[in-house]
Amino acid sequence: MRAVLSVARRAGPSEPAARSLNSLLGIRSALDVLGDIARLRVVDLTHPLHPGIPYWPGDGYGPFRYAQINFFEHDRKAAGLFEMPAHMGTHIDAPIHFVQNGTSVDCLSLDRLLKPAVTFDIAQRAATNASTLLDEADIDAWETRHGQVPRGSIALVRSGWGTHWGKPPAFRNDADGVMRFPAVSDGAARLLVLDRGAVGIGVDTLSADNGEAPDSPCHRLVHGAGGFILENLANLELVPEQGAFVLIAPLPIVGGSGAPARVLAFCDTEEQ
Ligand SMILES: [Zn+2]
């Protein structure tokens, strides 16, 4: 897959993509490369959008809204209008979410949105402790099995919390006014982003910071280093601990602090 990734990076606007592919792949054709990709297992890490999905209970936030403008009454066609907070559903947080003058979502480099993934599993702890965090020991254990986290990875945290997605009160878990769900410790974020060079962190909960965490330390650390955060990811149980790469396609909202994103994982069928 390495050849495919490098082609995706190098085909710039000044060079026709077909010529770049031919010169970089030699006798391999674009169709051969596409064939290789088609043999991979593709996992959709995106929750579908509808008015019943959970959302962050902050000021100005509200449910996803969709209205039909036309449903075949006129011109034999359907069209709709939707409205949503930028940080809703499966979405990406850009550095400007917590860093003044940081990179906004439309300016995230495409190169950083197509990267190898490493997946950490904290589901066993999360089943009995909703407030559990990914910590340095989880990364140590992963590296004992697989070697050091490669530079430029996207770090995914699988907590099993996605099973609550269809029940917003359980997903927020805030019956007493404080949200409790699995998240990422600032120590783990520091190790992954500052030391291992991860470009971003993804979680299957409402936030990479637990609702109890004062002042969002993980967000401040990751965004302060220029990294991004993916939240409300789906289907992480289908992504192997290593051997996958992730493609993130956020809406390029100009100046946006974040945006809904389609997130796909391409997994080697031999790696589980
Ligand atoms: Zn967010």
Image (cartoon, grey):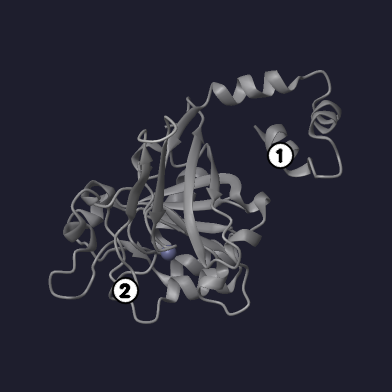
Amino acid type indicated by mark 2? Gly
Which quarter of the rendering shows the C terminus? top left
Disc 1 residue crowd, few under 14, some 14–19, many 20+, Cα 10 Å: some
Can residue 79 be seen here? The reply is yes
Query: How far from the left and from the top, in percent, is residue 68?
Result: 34, 45
Disc 2 residue crowd, few under 14, some 14–19, many 20+, Cα 10 Å: few
Check if mark 1's residue and mark 2's residue have beta carbons within 8 Å: no
Farthest front residue in view: 74
Res. 175 image quadrant:
bottom left
The residue at the point 43 percent across, 33 percent down is: 77
Farthest left residue in view: 175
Q: Quadrant of ligand 1?
A: bottom left
> Reading the chain from its start, which is encountered first: label 1 or label 2?
1
Query: Is the residue 30 above or below the residue 272 in the image?
Result: above
Please give the residue where the numbered disc 2 appears in the rendered image.
58
Query: How far from the left and from the top, in percent, is residue 34?
Result: 64, 23
Secondary structure at numbered mark 2: loop
- Foreground label between 1 and 2: 2
Task: Answer left or right for 16 relative to 155.
Answer: right
Task: Answer left or right for 98 relative to 239.
Answer: right
Query: Is the residue 259 above or below the residue 2 in the image?
Result: below
Secondary structure at numbered mark 1: helix
Please give the residue where the numbered disc 1 appears in the rendered image.
8
Real-space Cα distance between discs 1 and 2?
38 Å
Query: How far from the left and from the top, in percent, is residue 96?
Result: 56, 72
